[in-house]
Amino acid sequence: MENVKLAVLISGRGSNLAAIAQAIDAGTLRAQIAVVISNRAEAPGLDFARGRGIPTVTLAPRDFPSRDAFDAALAAAINAHAAPLVCLAGFMRRLGPAFCAAFPRAILNVHPSLLPAFPGLDAQRQALEHGVKVSGATVHFVIPELDAGPIVMQAAVPVFDADTVATLSERILVEEHRIYPEAIRRVIEGGWRIDGPRVVFDRPFAPVR
């Protein structure tokens, strides 16, 4: 089985990009990062990618006349690197219906809450403001509706009374880095189907230790 090519989309430091790369290095994820794409030229994650010899692409939304034009250019950049699986890793831009249709059941995202709770921006702050006792991380398929696609994996993180946005974010990020590569592996290895809003796995999944 050949390593599956991934297109990783980022907007910032790329810590989940690094977690994916480390899983590939460790042999726990049989994949290849074919391209890293950012909507921000100053994103530190681009330097990480370049340091590893991974091709990078920057697409600034302001350079396109419309959201659809940006999404079309993004899809073309991914297809140019023959990447069948798209992984959003802190990509701070909503993707439109045409883009989602171009990669059906092939776009993953990691979000810092236990979806469907607290979608959108500042999920950790939302959790603290609502006084929840448990939050966490979610890997899900991307659909045009915000943070609403079928869930692949989740991990719970306790919320402590003394937590700040920074401390809660740090603990959730640890779980993001753990479950995102595993979720990618589950998708790559197959044996799953989407049944309405649910991702159903037809065979047991053995985590790599």
Image (cartoon, rainbow, N blue to C red):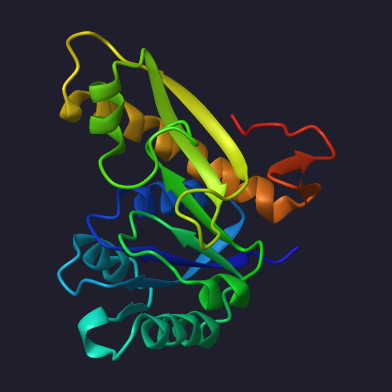
| Left or right position of 129 against 152 | left
Q: Position of residue 178 (x, y in %)?
A: 46, 35
Please report the residue visible at 20 percent of the width from the left and 65 percent of the height from the top.
43
Q: How many marks?
A: 0
Q: Is residue 199 left or right of residue 97?
A: right
List x then y, in percent, for residue 79: 54, 84
- Can the viewer see residue 180 in this picture? yes
Task: Kindly indicate the quadrant of the structure image that contains residue 113.
Answer: top left
Q: Quadrant of the C terminus?
A: top right
- Residue farthest to the right, as pictured: 202
Toward the viewer: 106 or 52?
106
As drawn, 148 above or below 54: above
Q: Of residues 145 and 171, which is closer to you in this image?
A: 145
Examine the image and state in which quarter residue 28 appears.
top right
Q: Where residue 92 sits in the image (x, y, percent)?
A: 30, 60
Q: Residue drawn 26% across and 80% down? A: 61
Instruction: Identify the residue at the far top of this view.
Output: 161
x and y, in percent, of residue 58 in the image: 28, 79
Q: Nearer the viewer, residue 33 or 183?
A: 183
